[in-house]
Amino acid sequence: MSLFCTGTCQGRGAAAYAGRMGRPIVGITADVGEYEWLGERRPRMQSAMTYARAVAAAGGLPMVLPPMVELIADHVAACDAFVFTGGDDPRMEMFGGVTSPRATPMHPLRQEFEVGLLRALAADSEKPVLGVCLGMQLMTLCAGGRLNQCLAETLASHDRHVKDARHAIVPEGGMAGAIPPGEVTSNHRQAAEEAGRLRVVARSEDGVIEAVDDPGRRFYVGVQWHPERTADAALGAGMFERLVRATGRT
């Protein structure tokens, strides 16, 4: 059997591939943009290399997932863990709300896929999940939480959270100390206001929810900062190391 896969490795083929490589497969969600072809706008999947490099450095085998709803079950079966990456803002209508006019809505194809994947993973508490920025926000919304859709309207220190600003993290317990104090790199204009069924495990010094988890699952963690761009070892590379270690295959 060839070691190379077209698109995403699926089913037993993926398991054999991972077995030969000796690394757990970590599925990474892709952003979705558009390009023009013969006068028609078509979707394009894209992913920053920083996520793949962080997963590989942590001992995982990174696989960028095509945002195809019909492949969700195959992705869940093929991957040992998942990273939900950063991006634009959630469309709130899917969650019974109204999208702020100041939001930059994420591509609807991406949102449909990632919400569907999160809901499919809700039935599998053994699959470790790390949500980054937008990823954490979607995790929170799927758990019945609420978002502050414009920090600039409610938070005087909102500029401490944008354009790769650095700020301190204040742990709130949970996760057996896995979220230590430190400094992180952030770039977000929205944030979780209520965590729903998830547990808040860290905040910024100005009170923004910075990390959530589900204590009933092996590793289900959302962070509002960008660990793939954070220099602090525990809050940066360490988040990917914990994700990979939680697969039990390292």
Image (cartoon, helix red, strand yellow):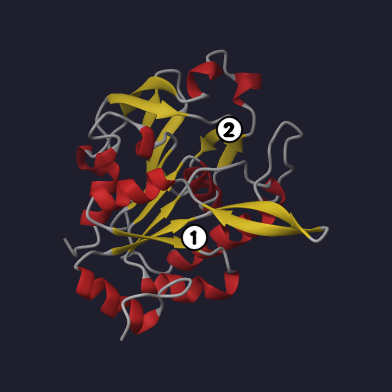
Task: Please identify the quadrant where the N terminus is shown.
Answer: bottom left
Q: Amino acid at mark 2?
A: Gln
Q: Tell me where residue 169 appears, x and y as whole percent.
A: 34, 25
Q: CA distance from mark 1 to mark 2?
A: 20 Å
Residue drawn at x 26%, y 64% as measured from the top left = 24
Residue shown at the point (55%, 50%) measured from the top left: 144
The residue under label 2 is: 190
Name which of mark 1 and mark 2 comes first in the sequence.
1
Quadrant where the image shows the C terminus? bottom left
Q: Type of residue at label 1?
A: Leu
Q: Residue at x 45, y 22 (%)?
A: 207
Q: State the residue position of label 1.
A: 118
x and y percentages locating residue 23 in the rendered image:
23, 64
Q: Mark 1: few, some, or many residues within 10 Å (few <14, many ≥20)? A: many
Across and down, in percent, residue 70 comes to 58, 75
Rendered position, 82 above or below 156: below
Q: Determine which of the numbered discs, if any, sits on residue 223 in the image.
A: none
Residue 214 visible (yes or no):
no
Pointer 2: residues within 10 angstroms few (<14), some, or many (20+)? many
Residues at marks 1 and 2 touching, judged by CB atoms closer than 8 Å: no
